Amino acid sequence: MRSELEPQLVWCFSESLHLSLREPIRAEVRPKKTSLWLAQIPFKIGQPKKQIVPKTVERDFEREYGKLQQLEEQTRRLQKDMKKSTDADLAMSKSAVKISLDLLSNPLCEQDQDFLNMVTALDTAMKRMDAFNQEKVNQIQKTVIEPLKKFGSVFPSLNMAVKRREQALQDYRRLQAKVEKYEEKEKTGPVLAKLHQAREELRPVRDDFEAKNKQLLDEMPRFYNSRLDYFQPSFESLIRAQVVYYSEMHKIFGDLTQQLDQPGCPDEQRERENEARLSELRALSIVADD
């Protein structure tokens, strides 16, 4: 049976998850991972005069890799936040059960049957809440957190592929500069021999870079675009788990309210009665101000 809460919950979670997947991170964006290992490669050694990689290709590569770096950060944050959320949920329901058990052991329950009945009803409700909460957390762990963790485990391999591409580019530049150096010299026999050898060394290195570059430019957009298809079942499961949980909570606390409410005793009257009792306690000499 669908709860009245369901439309609001579905809208709330779908909006939140939509933003998590589609919008860029706006704060604390980490520097590109390439910066650390690029800094370790000599920048000015063997730089060719010829532009061996078109600027448009470099811009396309940086754009696609930047999107994946943002996706990696978003995935890491979402996994961390989901873990915090489930831990907090469990702590909340466990604390509620502990409170109801403490109340049951209170001496007041031995003296007042009505109070005992009230606390017993609360204890039953808290235990039901804890059971449903544990079921919800287990489902979220299995269908959301674990898929996030598996998705995040792919990025180290991706970053390594980018690193290999950059190393291949550095080798390409170094050998291209070597070829250019011999091309600028006087065409003597030894120079021509060295030029031929340099060109032979350049050919497989150039082919290796172009293959790595093409593969990454082809596959990075495909990987990025696959994120919605991968995560959609997980997020649908998250929404269903939340809807089921809060629907059950509505029933549990509705039943508890019916058991605890006294006919003809509105909240305003209870507040006045409590204030009157508190005033009586304050009038006692042992709590009176000096």
Image (cartoon, helix red, strand yellow):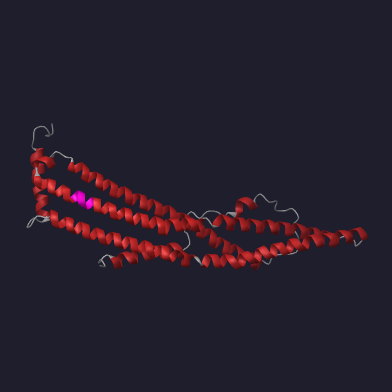
Q: Quadrant of the C terminus?
A: top left
Q: Quadrant of the N terminus?
A: bottom left
- Main SS class of the magenta portion in the image: helix
39 up-or-down from 216: above or below: above
Question: Residue shown at 34%/61% (left/top)?
Answer: 241
Relative depth, front residue between 105 and 61: 105
Give the residue drawn at x 25%, y 44%.
Answer: 98
Q: Is residue 253 magenta?
A: no
Does residue 196 appear anywhere in the picture? yes
Q: Is residue 268 left or right of residue 160?
A: left
At x 77%, y 58%, the residue is 175
Which image quadrant for residue 184? bottom right
The boundaries of the magenta stretch are 122-126
Question: Who is closer to the viewer here, 117 or 215?
Answer: 117
Displayed quadrant of residue 144? bottom left
In front here: 177 or 146? 146
Q: In this figure, what is the number of numbered marks? A: 0
Q: Position of residue 28 (x, y in %)?
A: 48, 54
User: Which quadrant holds residue 278?
Assistant: top left
Res 180 visible: no
Task: Return the residue found at the far right.
Answer: 189
Q: Residue at x 43, y 66 (%)?
A: 232
Left or right position of 1 against 228: left
Where residue 246 sits in the image (x, y, percent)? Answer: 28, 60
